[in-house]
Image (tube, rainbow, N blue to C red):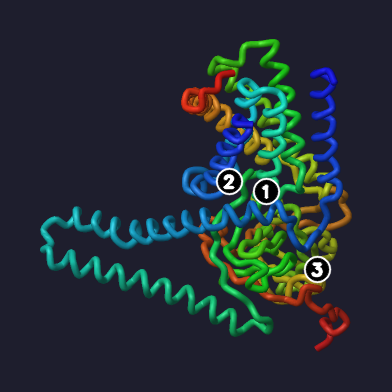
Amino acid sequence: MKAYLFGLLMAASALFFQTTTLIFVSSPVVKPDIVLIIVIWAATRFGFNEGILFSFSAGLLTDSLSGAPTGLFAFLYCVFFLACRYLDATTDLETHGARFVVTFVMCILEGISVLASRYMAGPFGVGMALALSVLAKAVFTGLLAAMFMPLLDRLWVERSRLSGFHR
Amino acid sequence: MPRSIRDVALVVVLLGLCLALIFSYGKKSEIGAAEAVVYRVFRPLEQGVSGVKNKLASLWNNYVYLVGVQQENRALKEELSRLRREKAELAAREAENIRVRKLLDIKTRLEHPSVVAQIIGEDASGWFRTFFIDKGTDDGVFAGMPVTATEGLVGRISRSAANMAQVVLITDSALAVDCRVARTRDRGVLRGALEGGCALRYLSPRAQAQEGDEVITSGLDGVFPSGLPIGRIHAIRMGEQGLFLEALVTPSVDFAALDQVLVILSTRGGFDVQSWTEERP
C-alpha cells in the first residue's frame, strides 16, 4: 500500500509537471511521458499487486488530464507494466542503456496505440511529420528515463529508509 | 486461492475494467465524480503555476528586457533607467488593457453571452491537442460550448467540472467543424491534422477556393455560431479518394501564445440551425 501511494504521488507530481511546467521547456509534440517512465520503473521495484494497481490508477489520472477516452491510458499502462515485469524477470533492466531502450520502445508502442485508437474514431492524415514526432517523443522520453530512474531509485531508498520498509 | 491465480484474476479484472471504460466512453456532458476530484485537486495548482508564469513573462518582457537595454546603454543615467522601468510597467498595463478591450469588444459583438477564461494547463500526454481553463459549470461553462479568441475560433469544451474545463482545439482530429470559404461560400468539414494546422475536407471538386482564402464557421453544425474566423488556406489538393478537394488551413489563432479565451455560453443543445435561410439574401 505504501508503495502504491508513493507511486501515485510521483505520478500526480509528474502529471502536474506535464500539464504546467513542461509548457515552457518543450513543444507539446515532443513532450516526454514521465508517467510512462514511472510505470516502467515501478515494474522493476514494486510488488505485483501494488504495481498493477498503481499502473491502472496512474493511467486513469492521465486519462482525466488529457483528451484521451477514459480507460485508454489505464489499459496501456497496465499492459506496459506486465510487459516490463516480464522483461525484468528475464533480462537486466538496471542499466542506463536497457532503461532507454525499454522506455523508447514502450513510448513508440504507446504512440502507435493512441494514434490507432484516434484513427478508428476519425481518420486523419498520417505522414512523415507525425512519424517523426512520435520518434522524437520516444527518444526524448527514453533519454529522460535514463536520467530520471536513478532519481526515482534514490527517492525510493529514502522512503524505504524513513518508513522502515524494504522490498 | 493460489497467488498466481489471484494475480491473473486481478489483471483480467483491471484490463476488463479498462476496456469497459473505453467502450462506454461517450459524449457525456458532465464528468464523473472521480474526475471531478482530480480536477478539484489540480485546478488550484495549475492556476498557481499559470499565475507565476504570467508574472514571470511580464517581468521578463517589461523589466529584464529593459535591464538588458540599460546594460547596452551604460552611459544613461540612473534617472533614465527608473523612468524606463515605469514606462515599461505602463506599457504592460496598456497591452493588458488592449487585450481585455479586444475581448470585451468581441463579447459585445457576439449575439450570445460569453465568459472570459484563463488557460491554466495543457494536455498531460501530448498526444491530444487540448488545454484546461479556469472556468467550469459554476460559471455556466458546459461541454459542447464554443471557445474563441480575438483572432478566431479556438475549439470546443469537451469536459467540464465545477471550476475547470477541458477545451479540445480545432487542431485536434477529434473535433470537426462545418465551415465555409468566406469568398466563394464553398462548404467543407474542418478537422485537425495532428501534423499541424487543419484540413478542410469534402470540398466540391468544382470549388473555387484558392490559397489565401479565409475560412469561417458556417453555423450549420448547430455547435458553432456562423461567421467565426478559423484561418487561411495555404494549400489545396485532391482528397485521397479523388472525389473531393481538400484544403490545408493555417489557423488564425496562435495557440502557443494564447493565454485567455472567450467561452460562448450557448444553450446546452447548441445553436439553432436554419440552413434554409442562409443562402437567401
Please give the name of the residue rendered at 29% of the width and 60% of the height, measured from the top-left corner. B63
The chain letter under disc 2 is: A
Give the numbered dot on residue B187.
Answer: 3
Chain under numbered label 1: B
Please say if the residues under marks 1 and 2 sit with CB atoms less than 8 Å apart: no
- Residue drawn at x 60%, y 31% as measured from the top left: A2
The residue closer to the viewer here, B10 or A74, is B10
Q: Is residue B161 above or below residue B225?
A: above
Q: Label 3 amino acid?
A: Arg
Could you tell whether B175 is left or right of B66 in the image?
Answer: right
What kind of element bears circle 2?
A: helix
Does B17 sit above or below residue A81?
below
Which tag, 1 or 3, sits closer to the chain's start? 1
Say which residue label 1 marks. Answer: B128
- Mark in front: 2 vs 3: 2
- Marks 1 and 3 sit apart, C-alpha to C-alpha, by 26 Å
Please name the residue shown 25% across and 70% down the image: B86
| Residue at 67% from the left image edge and 22% from the top image edge | A47
Q: Position of residue B12 (x, y in %)?
A: 84, 30
How dense is the environment of label 2, judged by Cα within 10 Å: few (below 14), some, or many (20 and up)? Answer: many
Assign a secondary structure to mark 3: strand
Q: Secondary structure at mark 1?
A: loop
Q: Are marks 2 and 3 on the same chain?
A: no
Can residue B151 be seen at all in this image of the molecule? no
Quadrant of the image occupied by residue B155: bottom right
The disc label shown at residue A73, or none: none
**Which x, y percent locates residue B59?**
33, 59
Q: Amino acid at mark 2?
A: Pro
Residue A58 visible to an observer of this rendering:
yes
